Amino acid sequence: MKEAIHDVSVETGVPQEKLQRMHDQHPDAGPAGLMIASVIADNAKGNPEQYLSRHVNGKGWGAIARENSVPLEKINNKLANLERELGSLPATGRDTGKQYRNQYRNGR
């Protein structure tokens, strides 16, 4: 997860410490959840923690993105970059983001 947090930080500009706190509070969000929340926050000029919290409390990523006028293509591109970066790491048996990207594409 340390490498994933680093990759999300590099890709989005959100400090690693903030991403680590978000992960500590919501460990099931995973790297993709951190990425999506950070991309939405960057576009909406908000705090990524607020978007992650909304998702954890039941709001779908697609709905959150639409409400904040965040282009789906931008999120998909960032997730693809993250998946590529994580794919270059040794296998851990954990999901690398496909689950969240699929949920996002399906509007959950």
Image (spheres, helix red, strand yellow):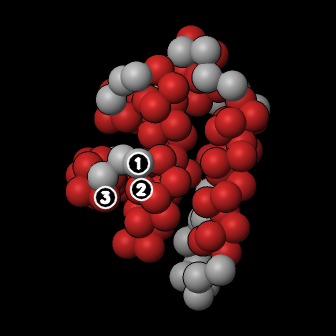
- The answer to whether residue 30 shows anywhere in this view is no
Residue at image point 47% right, 20% down: 44
Q: Is residue 53 above or below residue 79?
A: above
Disc 1 packing (10 Å; few <14; some 14–19; many ≥20): few
Q: Which amino acid, mark 1?
A: Gly
Of 59 and 85, the residue lying toward us:
85
Q: Earlier in the sequence, mark 2 or mark 3?
A: 2
Mark 2 lies on a secondary structure that is: helix
For residue 67, above or below residue 72: above
Identify the residue at horizontal 56%, vertical 12% (top origin).
67
Mark 3 crowd level (few <14, some 14–19, many ≥20, 10 Å Cα): some
Residue 69 seen from this side: yes
Quarter placement of the N terminus: bottom left
Amino acid tagged 3: Gln
Q: Which residue is painted at 54% across and 21% down in the image?
A: 64
Pointer 2 with pointer 3, Cβ within 8 A: yes
The structure residue drawn at horizontal position 62% and vertical position 70%, both measured from the top left corner, is 85
Find residue 34 and report its horizontal and vertical position in percent: 45, 47
Q: Position of residue 48 (x, y in %)?
A: 37, 34
Q: CA distance from mark 2 to mark 3?
A: 6 Å
The one of 19 and 100 positioned closer to us in this rendering: 19
Mark 2, Cα crowd under 10 Å, few <14 / some 14-19 / many 20+, is some
Quadrant location of the C terminus in the rendered image: top right
Q: Which residue is mark 1?
A: 13
Residue hosting label 3: 16
State the CA–CA distance, disc 1 to disc 3.
Answer: 9 Å
Q: Amino acid at mark 2?
A: Ser
- Asked which quadrant contains residue 6, the reply is bottom left
